[in-house]
Amino acid sequence: MDGTTYLADYTPYPFNIDKVSLRFRLAPHATRVQAHIAMTPLSPGAALRLDGEQLRLISAAIDGVALTPSDYLITPSGMTIHPAALPEAPFTLETEVEIAPEGNTALEGLYMSNGMYCTQCEAEGFRKITYYPDRPDVMAPFSVRIEGDLPVLLSNGNPVASGPGWAEWDDPWPKPAYLFALVAGDLVAHSGSFTTASGREVALNIFVRPGDEDRCAFALGALQRSMKWDEEAYGREYDLDIFNIVAVDDFNMGAMENKGLNIFNSKLVLASPETATDTDYERIEAVIAHEYFHNWTGNRITCRDWFQLCLKEGLTVFRDQSFIADMRLGPVKRIEDVIALRARQFREDQGPLAHPPRPDHYREINNFYTATVYEKGAEVVGMLRTLVGDEGYRKALDLYFERHDGQACTIEDWIKVFEDSSGRDLGQFKRWYTDAGTPRLRVTDDYADDTYTLTFEQHTPPTPGQPHKAPRHMPIAVGLLSPNGNEVVPTTVLEMTEARQSFTFTGLSTRPVPSILRNFSAPAVLERATSAAEQAFLLAHDTDPFNRWEAARSLARQTLMDMTKGAPPAAEYLDAIGRLLADDTADPAFRALILRLPGEDEIAQALHASGTTPDPEAIHAARGALMTTLAQRHEVALSATYESMAVPGAYTPDAAPAGCRSLRLAALALLSQIDGARRAEALFASADNMTESLSALSNLITAGKAEGALAQFRSRWKDVRLVMDKWFLVQASLCPPKTAAERVTTLAADPAFEWKNPNRFRSLLGAFSANHAGFHRADGAGYRFYADWLIRLDPLNPQTAARMSTAFETWPRYDKTRQALVRTELERIASSDGLSRDLSEMTARLLG
Ligand code: PHE
Ligand code: ZN
């Protein structure tokens, strides 16, 4: 396809960049950027190709001599200086350009948010700031001078000098341009410090808009915990004198790991008990850690090209997941991560957007910041650790840092480190990086003469461009239980490498019950005919907490699937939930996870995988009916749980009280089905924290009794943007599906719907697409509304519009009528005037 970039076409850049000095003279409509770039030619006779977009060139000179227009060629994508105009020895290129941050609604490059200047350069935003080789394998030390009439002027590295209206920064660590950052604004800092293992003191600052400084303490603590953890778990110390975080309201993604100057979506920094939920707190801690951990996995060692994105993202997600598992309850965290993996990545793998963790072509790299690159990338790292063991993993990572510090690397480099440190051949394992799709793992078993045999067959369905898949090297963690519930074979990792493979266990006097894929040791779909009784047995007896939960989850999923076809709820499931509610030995957070039913999209995904066309209305009805049945059946126990899990005293976001709240609110969701939302009403009136307040409000919406509460919530929070986002979100995601399209249409007309702000856009549109039966309404009203807004957003912010088009990725699952309705909308988007490259790549892939 035209404009496609291929992995196979990689060639190194023919110049070394020795040093970059930048000078910014800030002005909203006409910022001047002077660049002073010292370089050494590596390949005589090569032209000097620089990326640059939406720049107005003021001047260009080499070694102090002005270039004339015949020395270079300027196109909309960059500037090429002819070889004849270039010295053969090291030289300095000086350019000056003018840019307009005020009009930059794409939020890429230098832009403005509420009067504050801010940059976002990953993946290819630096080219909107100045002419430069904007590719990750070109690394250089940067120094920056900022001139602007604003109190806070920040860039990467260490502060050098400053005065009224100017500041200078120096970053000694060579970095690719995507890690460049600049911030200027009227900001206040919440400050602290950290002393590294070797005794250096690092100044820490969280910069926010005045008025927000009392919501930064949690983020600062999370940063300090992350710094300590990275020293202990990975031996990684911080390497500058200062670490700054800035919170910005207008941001396309979650956060960005710019060297020494992380920039965050304010929703991932600001938290107080009254405004943030337990989930928000946990997410803030994870993302603060994630961006901090990038300092080593991403910044000190970066990616050779953007195809290698999962080298930094998969590893860094794996690291932040391990960190949270250590800070909180490990098994609970693992279950949460797998729920998210299935909801986002398995879903992606099942549809037209499926791609490998390391893709081999793209049109717009921004479209590849996906669940597959991030979350599946993390699973692949987890499998490597399972294969080489904890010590082997630490050895491999030590070698990785030692061998590759300061380099721009590939997945091949990464795998080689594991091969060299463990002595193992990981050639077949590499398929996890290059092949798309979720493997299906069919299991059969056999028992005879004290010997138990497990036979696995693996098969990965076709994905776009990859019709046939070879078998993968898969670690399958297995344990065996005796019928009385004792573990007779503890967790053992079986290494599957063939398409079909058997493993035997000897010396077993009775036929055991297998617990397969413990801790979700490989991201596969297990296909095994098991009875509800066996699932209930595992839920009661498995020693692996993940598989206990998994047993309950499959019971619930199967029950719901059967209910969509008219069957009554499975007795085994209802009884198992009763036993669980009575089990005070199980952790509340764990019990809460079991009590929460699979979402409607997960049920649709499972139906599709089993060959049934999902019916969104039937799924919605079945889920509601099961909740009601559970509530009726266990009313007494649920009510007791609701009371006993109330957390006394002042709110703290710690894991233990959050776990109690989670269980309490899971009980509330069920009870609200049968108590006329009486408890939810009372809780809404009394709650002193956002976790309970929002959950109460959600139940009132589901019960159709929220109008008063919504008005009250709005008048209390109208000036707090992040909380108003929640006001939109709960309505769009939970309002009754039959009238959801009308509801969101009304919400979109509300003056508070500031649609150019990505968070606000997502809290209406993203939340609506999660209202499964509402979005997939049979008359297509949901699809039409959604497509209208993508078309409207695209010219302003293509990145967010393209990302949100993934709501349509599940269309092949549904009936022919819905398929046709979605196609109509996708074709309408595709034929819009001036469609961005981002969204046009997405619609092309979605249409297949
Ligand atoms: N690299 C950022 C992160 O993971 C994500 C990001 C990508 C942010 C592109 C902005 C733009 O952690
Ligand atoms: Zn990241």
Image (cartoon, grey):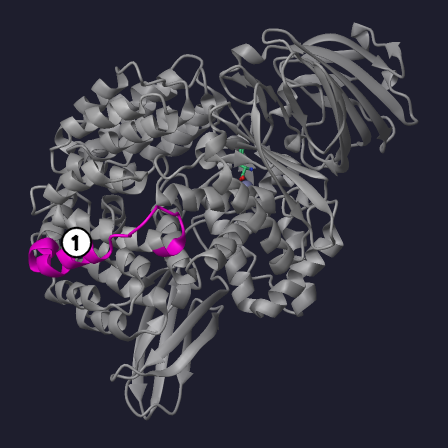
479 sits left or right of 138 in the view:
left
Magenta residues (range): 629-656
Q: Position of residue 473 (x, y in %)?
A: 50, 64
Left or right: 471 in relation to 293 = left
Taking the spot 33% from the left edge, 34% from the top edge, the residue there is 807
- Furthest toward the front, the residue is 649
Label 1 sits on residue:
560
Left-right relation of 211 to 172: left
Q: Is residue 225 above or below residue 142?
A: below
Q: For residue 730, what is the image quadrant? A: top left
The correct choice, above or below, for 370 with respect to 752 in the image is: below
Asked whether residue 205 is drawn in magenta, I would say no
* Residue occupying image coordinates x 7% and y 56%: 567
Asked whether 823 or 524 is in front, the reply is 524
How crowded is the residue under tag 1: few (<14 C-alpha within 10 Å), some, or many (20+)? many
Residue 17's quadrant in the figure? top right
Q: Is residue 756 above or below residue 672?
A: above
Identify residue type, mark 1. Leu
Judging depth in this view, the residue of 811 and 178 nearest the camera is 178
Q: Main secondary structure of the magenta part?
A: helix
Q: Is residue 773 left or right of residue 402?
A: left
Beta carbon at label 1 within 8 Å of ligand 1 = no
Splitting the image into four quadrants, where does ligand 2 fall? top right
**Residue 95 screen position, x and y as percent:** 77, 14
- Tell me the quadrant of the picture where the C terminus can be found: top left
Question: Which type of secondary structure does the marked residue at label 1 adopt?
Answer: helix
Q: Toward the viewer: 660 or 483? A: 660
Residue 758 in sight: yes
Residue drawn where x is 21% and y is 33% of the image? 776
Residue 630 within the magenta-colored segment of the rendering:
yes
Residue 605 location (% of width, % of height): 27, 48
